Each structure stands twice: as structure tokens, then as C-alpha cells.
Image: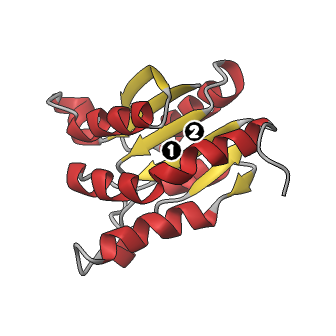
Amino acid sequence: MRAAILTVSSSRARDGGLDESGARLSVLAESVGAEVAARDLVADDREPIEERLRRWADVDRYELVLTTGGTGFSPSDLTPEATRAVIEREAPGVAEAMRLASREHTPNWMLSRAVAGIRGSTLIVNFPGSPRAVSQAGDAIAAALPHALALISGHGADH
């Protein structure tokens, strides 16, 4: 299984710097058995986010695409809108589990607008931009990811 990691950050795209959240998503992907085949960074702009998600799902056919950043309330936080424009089916339980995992760590847990969904045979999951929040949210969904990916690929157990 191959994964791709997209960091959405205008400041990092402009100024560079360490992408700790992307690095934590790479660790998460590897922990569920994925090979991280691509990693990229784009500014908070819908068009490049949508383009990258479509290309990774439709052309490169990565089974798992994880994004970090752009999920809050700021006017420039457009990752959920870009993701909704790309996915064909939403996976609300994944995003709900991630928000609930943050509840014990911050009173602002409900301000995350992250979404998750499926495009073709690719699962796309938005994570917060904070490295600490990435780890907390990742811990909440890691155990379910292999089964979710097996179901999407048509190799899941009969229900």
C-alpha cells in the first residue's frame, strides 16, 4: 500500500522550515503498513490542494492520502473545501473520531473542520496542522485504517 502526505501551509511554502506535522503523518502511514511514496507542501490555496489530491488519487493511485493544515476557522483555511470538492464519498466517522481524540487535550477541539472521504480507491484524511494534534488524531484512527483501506480496495471481509 502506498501513501502520500500533503502539508498545507502558506508560511512554510513561503519561508521553508521544518515540516514536523508532515513527518508525523509519515510515521503514522508507515505504522499502518504503508510506504510513503510522495510528500509535498503547498500554500493555503484551494486550486493546488485539489490538483494534488486528484493527481494522487487518479493518476498515481495512492491508496492513502493524508493532509495536514488548513482545517481551522481562519479565512485561509481551505483544506476541507478542497477535499470535499475532490472526494466522491465522505467518511464522517473518521473525522469525528479525530475530533473526539482532541477533546481531552484542548477546549478548542470542536473548531477542527477536518474531513475524510474516498475518491476512487483512495482514502483522503485531513489532519490538523499542529504536530501534537496530528499525533493525537492519528492515534485515534490508526487501528481502523488498514480495515478501511481493505474495504475500499474490495478486499475487506464480508459483512
User: Where residue 119 sits: x, y (%)?
Assistant: 71, 41
Q: Is residue 107 visible?
A: yes
The residue at which mark 1 appears reads as 46
Q: Residues within 10 Å of mark 1 (few under 14, many from 20)?
A: some
Q: Is residue 120 visible?
A: no
Q: Residues within 10 Å of mark 2 (few under 14, many from 20)?
A: some
User: Where residue 14 sits: x, y (%)?
Assistant: 22, 31
* Residue type pointed to by label 2: Glu
Please state, as top left, top right, bottom left or bottom right, where the N terminus lies in the image: top right
The residue at which mark 2 appears reads as 50
Q: Quadrant location of residue 42?
A: top left
From what the image shows, is residue 154 above or below residue 158?
Answer: above
User: Where residue 61 sits: x, y (%)?
Assistant: 67, 23
Q: Tell me the SS state at disc 2.
A: helix
From what the image shows, is residue 68 above or below residue 19?
Answer: below
Q: Tell me the SS state at disc 1.
A: helix
- Confirm or deny contact between disc 1 and disc 2 (CB under 8 A): yes
- Determine the residue positioned at 32% across, 77% down: 103
- Determine the residue positioned at 47% across, 55% down: 141
User: Where residue 58 sits: x, y (%)?
Assistant: 71, 26
